[in-house]
Image (spheres, rainbow, N blue to C red):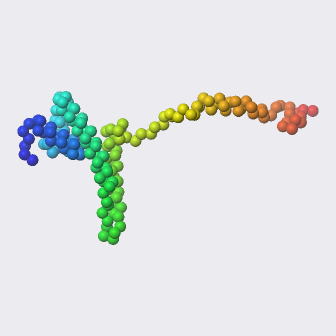
Amino acid sequence: MAALKNRAEVAQVVLDSMLGGASMRQSCIKAGIGASTWIDWVSADRELGERYARAREGLLDAMVDQILTLADAPVPLLDNGATDPGLVRQRQLQIDARRWVLSKLAPNKYGDRLDVSVSDSRISITGALAAAQMRLADVVDVTPRLGSTAQGEPSEGEG
């Protein structure tokens, strides 16, 4: 690649490369600058920072496309017609790595979420407890009393 003339051209190469699915570091290498230089530029230029943020979003979307491409691609068969388990495992690792990165870089959008909130108003814990206490009040007290047995006969200590 011919030497780029100015910062704007270099920045455009980095941003375009990221939108194509390359990481920021890979994009910087392609543009011929170091990642620390890129970070300095982004920190110093608000407009470039905003463009970089949009490119990062585009990179995440490209990763989603990569996951779908990997998942949908047929696995080559071995000479005997069987599926190569090593290739299947490699593809799964590629998908898992991208999923992990997505879940860390954009957890609100791509993270695994477990919603444990209770939004059903048909069930009332307070009401259920009150009903249970009312049922307990209706139960006959079956605790043995000193001096009598369950059949109403005097216990051993009584005369």
- Most foreground residue, 156 or 3: 3
Q: Seen in the image, is 78 located left or right of residue 141? A: left
| Residue 22 occupies quadrant | top left
Say left or right for 12 vs 21: left
The foreground one among 77 and 153 is 77
From this viewpoint, is residue 91 visible? no
> Is the C terminus in the top left, top right, bottom left or bottom right quadrant?
top right
x and y, in percent, of residue 154 in the image: 89, 34
Instruction: Work out whether 144 lies above or below 2.
Output: above
Residue furthest front as drawn? 122
User: In which quadrant of the rendered view does residue 152 lie?
Assistant: top right
Q: Position of residue 79 (x, y in %)?
A: 30, 70
Q: Is residue 25 above or below residue 119?
A: below
Residue at 28% from the left image edge and 42% from the top image edge: 60
- What residue is rendered at 34% in x and 44% in y? 100
Q: Residue at x 59, y 31 (%)?
A: 125
